[in-house]
Amino acid sequence: MLRLAIQKSGRLSEDSLQLIRECGISFLSSSYKLKTEATNFPLEILFLRDDDIPGYVQDGVADLGIVGQNVLEEADGAHLQVEALGFSKCRLSLAVPRGDAYESVATLQGKSIATSYPHLLGRYLAAHGVQAQLHTISGSVEIAPSIGLAEAICDIVSSGSTLLGNGLREVETVFRSEAVLIAQPHLSAEQKDLLDQLQFRMQAVRRAKRNKYIILNAPETALDEVRRLLPGIKSPTVTPLAEAGWVSVQSVVQEDDFWHITSQLKAVGAEGILVLPIEKMIA
């Protein structure tokens, strides 16, 4: 059995549990349980503080973990990373009071900065030749300038609304983060096989989210151009329609390219374009 540690609450926890369920793994969870066992896959899930997860995995208490890359890097645990998961994206940013003058990171020379990420921030400042006084605090970093604790902050930012609500403005991006899968270095052969199975499922789910299934009708005279626009995984599926001179085309298109390709398809005569989500996509 694999023991997987995830954050016990918050957005990263919700996204991690959703991914596990989308991998076809069933389990019961509740707000008061700190561990649960899957019913159809040899997996036990531990609900822990995010800051503790890299240490638990490094020490072998948990075999795997899903954690923010920012937390992993702060704990100097980059060697544990197996795979980036593509969700819960955010950034670690420097922010200053809205009314303060700011030209570049050099403006922070000699200033005091409050942060929960002294390692990442210290590395960033050193790379830019800036020396500053770092105040390490575990939460409510945004309040530090207004109570006189620090002249700037460095904290995780998603939308920026929390900064705005506390009279701050974002000035530098220190580190970009997303959820990552990590593993302890000494998995047994059986555990490595289970990890491969779990990664296979995760990759199928993530690949499906990045692609859409598209069905359309097109005149035969435009088929070569439609094929060029929709190469698919190998090639599109083409089926003659009852109406002479027309075909139905089925293919897969990447989410990022969808709107651009759709407009081009319409321009060459495609009609009745249907777009469907893909639940799983096996390479």
Image: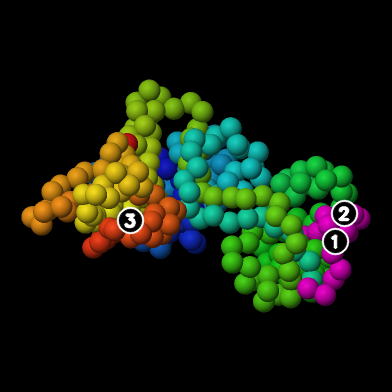
Residue 103 is marked as 1
Element under disc 1 = loop
Callout 1: few (<14), some (14-19), or many (20+) C-alpha neighbours within 10 Å?
A: few
Callout 2: few (<14), some (14-19), or many (20+) C-alpha neighbours within 10 Å?
A: some
- Answer whether residue 139 is magenta in the image: no
The reply to whether discs 1 and 2 touch (Cβ–Cβ < 8 Å) is: yes
* Image location (x, y in percent) of residue 93: 70, 57
Residue furthest to the left? 242
Residue furthest to the top? 189
Q: From what the image shows, is residue 41 above or below residue 184?
A: below
Q: Which residue is found at the position 51% from the left and 49% from the top?
A: 179
**Badge 2 amino acid:** Ala
Mark 3 highlights which residue? 268
Q: Quadrant of the C terminus?
A: top left
- Near-viewer residue (276 or 216): 216
Callout 3: few (<14), some (14-19), or many (20+) C-alpha neighbours within 10 Å?
A: some
Q: Which residue is found at the position 65% from the left and 38% from the top?
A: 76
* Image location (x, y in percent) of residue 164: 68, 74
Q: Could one spot residue 218 in this view of the protein?
A: yes
